[in-house]
Amino acid sequence: MLIDRARNILLWLALSLLAACGGGGSQTSEPPPPANASLAVTLSGLPAGLVAPVRITGPANFSREITQTTTIGQLAAGTYTVAASNVVSGSTTFVPAQAEQAVAVAAGATATVTVSYSALTLTLGLREVARFNGAVFALSPPGQARLYIVERAGRIGILDTAGRMLTVPFLDISSRVSTQGEGGLLSVAFHPQFATNGFFFVYYTDFQRNIVVERFSVSPNLNLADATSGLQIISIPHPNFSNHFGGLAAFGIDGFLYLGTGDGGGAGDPLRNGQNVNSLLGKLLRIDVNNTTVGQRYAIPSSNPFVGQSGRRGEIWAYGLRNPWRFAFDSSGLYIADAGQDRREEVDIAALSQAGLNYGWNTMEGTLCFNATSCNQAGLTLPAFEYDHGPTDTGGCSVIGGFVYRGKAIPELAGRYFFSDFCGGYLKSFQAGGGGVRELANWGIPNIGNVVSFGRDNDGELYIIGQDGRVHKIIRTSAPRS
């Protein structure tokens, strides 16, 4: 009897557990799908060696990226999505016939799918937007669609949103600007909070050949600066020669103001300013211009590499430069186009956080020994990209640095750094990555003439400026990608 009672209790417990698990056993959980299916993905239409990331997603949170023809095994049965993006190589965009494909994969079987690419050639052209006598730079302030164009003689003009140059200059300081040699009003930098504080900074040379950076404010009339608001931030003596003034003031992503100064002039840097860390010439400087007062025109960021070191100027961020006429910031790094002496032009690329780099001048000219008697390359950072002048400067004579394209009008160009050459008069680009550059492209645009600078608006679109004062916008001339 005790055995029967025990058996009844166990039976009652078993029935109770079954009921608790869903209706007395009327519902059972589905077994997992067998992982014995396969998907063969074929990529076609791409040149050898070109990487084309394709993303496959499917059941059980499956996700994998492939870059070549592949068969994926041990898959659960179900529907998989194969997603492909455009692939850019130089001036050619490879477009998939279908951006997304849904593929049913049956248990125990192999499904196949082909991602077919076709080539579309991207061509670029120029559209003239302004002629401004002696134009050397162009930039839009934060929050504005208008383009401000810098004239070397000492004026800044405004190209309005209708494409018209305003007749009255935004700023005219021609009475204090010297255009001797390579001097003049060379650039403008708008404070990141320009929309609220109205501050902007100009980089020019005065009649004593000093490099001057001065802060101004906009007036209540947004078309005019307050010419009486000038506050000199820094004056760097440059007494010996009338060339190699550098020329750019620009705010970095960190909010500090960077200045690219030339080595003081003279062939071969006779004063050795490039390697002298107690001189502000031949350098990239970084200063803090926030909360500026008459008593303190700027502060030195504590993270600058030579702060507090005897015999070294705390303003220096990088050194060993010859004439960094133009440089540019991007999420991919800091690009410095440094003009060479007789043979090589270079572009130096560094991470935004890399401080204290020595780019080698005048020990090196690019990767060539310039000073053969002391060509010790220890501790030097050699260029990421360089090119030779060639016979009679057929390859160029002075690099003109531009910007990394981040606009929306030509998305295929994203991440490509544009540059030119004063003598070459071309438009070229490359993409940085992996410690070097790739996809060097010559966009085949003729008749630019002598190029002096680039410009950029708030949409990230780029402009190229000729010595003749013509300002051109870089545009697409081929059909846009689908």
Image: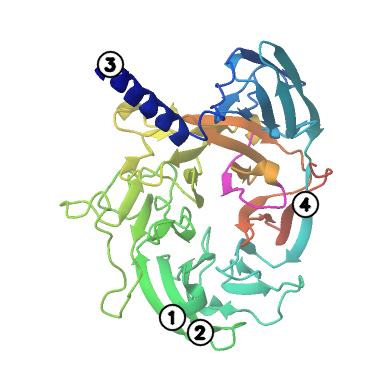
- Judging from the image, what secondary structure is the residue with disc 3 in? helix
Look at label 2 and name its amino acid: Ala
Q: Nearer the viewer, residue 173 or 41?
A: 41
**Residue drawn where x is 24% and y is 57% of the image:** 302
Q: Nearer the viewer, residue 182 or 471?
A: 471
What residue does disc 3 label? 3
**Label for residue 227?**
2
Residue 122 image point, x, y percent: 77, 38
Look at label 1 and name its amino acid: Gly
Q: Earlier in the sequence, mark 2 or mark 4?
A: 4
Does residue 297 appear left or right of residue 33 in this picture?
left
Q: Nearer the viewer, mark 3 or mark 2?
A: 3
Q: Nearer the viewer, mark 1 or mark 3?
A: 3
- Disc 1 from disc 4: Cα separation: 36 Å
Q: Is residue 180 above or below residue 111?
A: below
Q: Is residue 356 above or below residue 383?
A: below
Q: Nearer the viewer, residue 73 or 415?
A: 73
Image: magenta residue range: 394-410
Q: Are marks 3 and 4 in contact (CB under 8 Å)?
A: no
